[in-house]
Image (cartoon, rainbow, N blue to C red):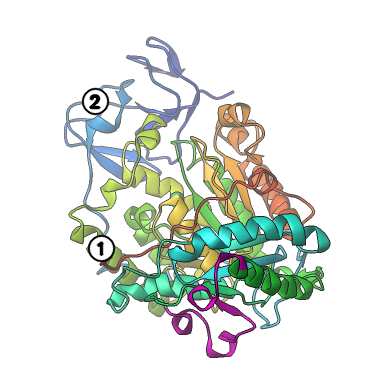
Amino acid sequence: MRKYVKVHDIDNVAIAVLPVMAGEEICEGITANMDIPQGHKVALEEIPADGKIIRYGVTLGYAKDLIAKGDWINENMLDLPIPPSLEDMQFAVNLNTDLPKAPARTFMGYASADGGYAGTRNLLGIHTTVQCVTGVLNVAVDRIRKELLPLFPHVDGVVPINHAYGCGVAINAPEAKVPIRTLRNLVHHPNFGGEVMCVALGCEKLTVEMLLDPKDNTAENVIVLQEVKGFDAMITAIMEMAQVKLEHLEARRREELPLSKLLVGMQCGGSDAFSGVSANPSAGYAADMLVEAGATVMFSEVTEVRDGVHFIGERCINAEVGQRLAQEMRWYDQYLANGEVDRSANPTPGNKKGGLSNIVEKAMGSIAKSGTSPIVEVLSPAERPSKHGLIYAATPASDIVCGPCQLASGIGLQVFMTGRGTPYGLAGAPVIKVCSRNEMKEQWPDLIDVNAGPVATGEQTIQQVGTTLFHTIVNVASGTEKPFAEKYQLNNDLCIFNPAPIT
Ligand code: CA
């Protein structure tokens, strides 16, 4: 097994595959000057003060002081570079069409009546205009699950779309369009089968008219609690409406569909220094295969691409898509600046413990999950794609906020890469967990679906793990395989991105 991973020829650092003891030889001519934790960086050559620290072929930062060959480089030893300029990016100069051939071209999904992306599950989604109705809805949902769901064996579950938005918010603020768009697009998620059911309060700012299309805003689809006499009648009304919707959903059947009907979201969270060499590149390989087969793959997380945005710009299919990318980045730069921070506020204590020194290193690893294919469209958070291929959606990087944004965009499932581990899951679509290290799989054997650790140790290739992941994606999309988070119903709350003021 190899002791270190060096990514690019010009790198002057490598990461330790396992913990290294002081005095231990890492490779020929390089001995560790001190203990180096797993995943952390070791200097392969002497780096002078202000010298570049290079990994992935890019400058992670500048050495604060002289670093000797064999030294451990931790997050306190480098200064952050300025982010890449958004003004002079090059577009459409790196358009790779030589993608790995996918071993499958179809899956078993639920065709959507609107001709858009297919569903991967058959779920009753119950939408809400405001958090105030959540208590009542949850009581009703408990009873629907116990009393009604067993009568409909072809329906997989009931998903209340509970959220913190809807009232006490500046509903007319320009950025209120983000949470409103998110909630509106969730109504049309392909897993909900075109059935619309909404529980409203009656006095909230996010009115039913704002949430639903006019054709959907009917007495058959909407219950307004303030118009119902008492609690018992509310529960009865919700259950009666649910029964009708479940009868409709019960008729849905899977059919063989081309992969062009599948939309897959990619996300990472709890990343470590291995994420960028094992889990994310494997996901990127699977993404390339999906795109080759005609599927659509969405990646996101603005602060985790910002430092590598010039690489993404080069892959934008034309200047129009590239300018849209620059525009989304500028918006997010300003959003962060308004809060008197920048993208360096992203990394967590766990990221750093896992060897990620700063946001540049995290971003370079994060981008790897997008694979190599051209980017055909750039979206604002929670917008629905209009193109097929690789798509960038400019959502926050926070797992629990990115998830609902991608869900609103219509993802049939999400692939989630982790180094430190998170039990995260979404009720509306299955989440496949991919880990970056063997130790993570050993720690959580019953939470991690695919282990990319053998890529870090050199025992398997990115192509091997990426192909395994591709098959897992197709199986999960087809319903023949359930990832652990779905099996255990590990469903995070829907944290809707609201960049607008709360009143
Ligand atoms: Ca994330």
Direction from residue 275 to residue 69 in the image, left or right: left
Q: Which residue is drawn at 66% across and 77% down?
A: 194
Residue 473 seen in this snapshot: yes
The quadrant of the picture occupied by the C terminus is bottom left
Res. 67 mark: 2
Q: Which of 410 and 199 is in front in this view?
A: 199
Q: Which residue lies furthest to the top in this view?
A: 23
Q: What residue type is labelled 1?
A: Tyr
Q: Residue 370's x, y, as percent?
A: 51, 57
Secondary structure, mark 1, is helix
Q: Residue 385's x, y, as percent?
A: 53, 75
Q: Residue at x 62, y 77 (%)?
A: 196
Q: 10 Å neighbourhood of mark 1: few (<14), some, or many (≥20)?
A: some
Direction from residue 367 to residue 50 in the image, left or right: left
Q: In this view, does 487 lie above or below 164?
A: above
The quadrant of the picture occupied by the N terminus is top right
Q: Mark 1 points at which residue?
A: 335
Q: Residue at x 50, y 40 (%)?
A: 277
Instruction: Kindly tell me whether mark 1's CB lies below 8 Å from ligand 1.
Output: no
Res. 422 mark: none
Residue 377 seen in this snapshot: no
Q: 10 Å neighbourhood of mark 2: few (<14), some, or many (≥20)?
A: many
- Depth-wise, is mark 1 or mark 2 nearer the camera? 1
Residues drawn in magenta:
207-232
Q: In this view, does 408 lie above or below 279?
A: below
Q: Which residue is drawn at 44% across and 82% down?
A: 210
Direction from residue 91 to residue 211 in the image, left or right: right
Q: Which amino acid does label 2 sit on?
A: Ile
